[in-house]
């Protein structure tokens, strides 16, 4: 009970008859845990508990549970402990330790990910990419403490949306048409322009945006769209272009690069990755993963991820990663997959 209380597991049980019977078996006056809450089950599955084996029938159990003759017959048929009593080191049936198999295997893996898991999440992606991701992630996940089932599930749910099924993590494309850059509102299937700078400077949208007679000047668009935002300098600094969206979590803005790099320096100092002096390093598997891990920890996302596995918890992570995205529902759908894969 002390362990359960420390886990802050609370009671929300509707079936009073089940509660009554379990209380009789355990000696609890009130049950301190939840049967049907997934968040609490994920905590309980990591406990190792000592209680009498259900494979050993006793008349007392039948009496406490009020089993009828048919149920007693079924339970006796499944009871084998007495028959194995001569096996060396087999404990007494009243003194057996139990653990959840999925939780046990997860602990043995030490926070690592496997190729089998990535094959489920990214079935169409290049095998070399997946193997490289596994190598980098497993090398550093302990350093960044992104190594519990819940943290891994949230982390990869976000990455799945950012990189897609083929694990594409190129530079953010700034190949916008002049018409879209100027558009202030979505009209039917025509999306609004993503940058307020060009709403207010339509002449620049015509000058640098893609038209029938010219290609988009992507560098000019980025420098104007991201000037004086997220730690970037003015248009002439080229910060908008150098620190546009890149990596597994499309890191955008010099200040976000800097805080991510600070945690890379802290938790992976021997990696040699520096996305400030060499922003293109983020386009490698190692740079993309480490920058994403650095962003994750620098924005306290481990703590947010550990709060739970419900929709609201996925949304809370998404608000930090990409507040203005229209993909909240997609990221929640991703999480339905990742939480199964990682046993969240």
Image (tube, helix red, strand yellow):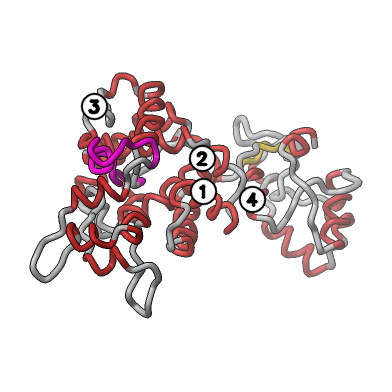
For this view, does 187 lie left or right of residue 54?
left
Mark 3 and mark 1: Cα distance apart in space: 28 Å
The answer to whether mark 3 and mark 2 are in CB contact below 8 A is no
Q: Earlier in the sequence, mark 4 or mark 2?
A: 4
- Mark 4, mark 1: which one is toward the viewer? 1
Q: Is residue 118 above or below residue 281?
A: below
Q: Residue at x 9, y 63 (%)?
A: 214
Q: Nearer the viewer, residue 186 or 267?
A: 186
Q: Main secondary structure of the magenta part?
A: loop
Magenta-colored stretch includes residue 244: yes
- Tag on residue 277? 3
Task: Give SS at disc 3.
Answer: loop
Mark 4 and mark 3: Cα distance apart in space: 42 Å
Task: Give SS at disc 2.
Answer: helix
- Mark 3, mark 1: which one is toward the viewer? 3
The answer to whether mark 3 and mark 1 are in CB contact below 8 A is no
Kindly identify which residue carries mark 2: 301
Q: Nearer the viewer, residue 123 or 102?
A: 123
Kindly identify which residue carries mark 4: 39
Q: Position of residue 69 (x, y in %)?
A: 83, 68
* Farthest residue, direction bottom: 188
* Label 1 packing within 10 angstroms: few (<14), some (14-19), many (20+): many
Residue range (magenta): 229-249
* Label 4 packing within 10 angstroms: few (<14), some (14-19), many (20+): some
- Tag on residue 317? 1
Magenta-colored stretch includes residue 182: no
* Label 3 packing within 10 angstroms: few (<14), some (14-19), many (20+): few
**Quadrant for the N terminus in the image:** top right
Q: Earlier in the sequence, mark 4 or mark 3?
A: 4
The answer to whether mark 2 and mark 1 are in CB contact below 8 A is yes
Q: Earlier in the sequence, mark 2 or mark 1?
A: 2
Q: Earlier in the sequence, mark 3 or mark 2?
A: 3
């Amino acid at each position: 009970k002390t362990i359960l209380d420390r886990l802050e597991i609370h009671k929300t049980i509707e079936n009073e008859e089940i509660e009554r019977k379990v209380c009789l078996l355990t000696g609890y006056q009130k049950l301190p845990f939840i049967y049907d809450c997934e968040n609490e089950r994920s905590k309980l599955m990591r406990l190792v508990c000592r209680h009498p084996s259900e494979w050993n029938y006793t008349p007392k159990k039948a009496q406490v549970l009020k089993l009828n003759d048919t149920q007693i017959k079924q339970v006796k048929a499944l009871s084998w402990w007495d028959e194995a009593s001569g096996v060396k080191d087999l404990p007494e049936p009243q003194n057996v330790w139990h653990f959840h198999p999925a939780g046990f295997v997860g602990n043995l893996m030490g926070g690592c990910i496997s190729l089998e898991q990535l094959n489920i999440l990214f079935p169409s992606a290049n095998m070399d990419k997946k193997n490289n991701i596994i190598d980098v992630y497993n090398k550093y996940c302990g350093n960044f403490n992104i190594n519990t089932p819940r943290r891994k599930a949230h982390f990869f749910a976000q990455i799945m949306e950012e990189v897609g099924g083929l694990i594409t993590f190129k530079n953010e494309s700034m190949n916008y048409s002049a018409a879209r850059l100027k558009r202030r509102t979505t009209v039917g299937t025509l999306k609004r322009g993503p940058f307020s700078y060009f709403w207010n400077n339509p002449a620049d949208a015509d000058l640098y945006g893609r038209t029938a007679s010219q290609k988009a000047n992507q560098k000019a668009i980025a420098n104007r769209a991201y000037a004086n935002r997220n730690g970037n300098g003015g248009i002439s600094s080229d910060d908008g272009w150098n620190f546009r969206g890149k990596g597994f979590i499309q890191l955008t803005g010099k200040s976000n690069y800097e805080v991510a790099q600070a945690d890379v320096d802290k938790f992976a100092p021997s990696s040699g990755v520096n996305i400030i002096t060499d922003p293109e390093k983020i386009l490698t598997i190692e740079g993309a993963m480490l920058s994403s891990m650095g962003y994750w920890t620098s924005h306290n996302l481990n703590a947010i991820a550990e709060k739970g596995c419900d929709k609201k918890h996925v949304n809370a992570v998404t608000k930090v990663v990409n507040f203005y995205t229209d993909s909240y529902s997609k990221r929640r759908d991703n999480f339905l997959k990742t939480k199964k894969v990682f046993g969240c």
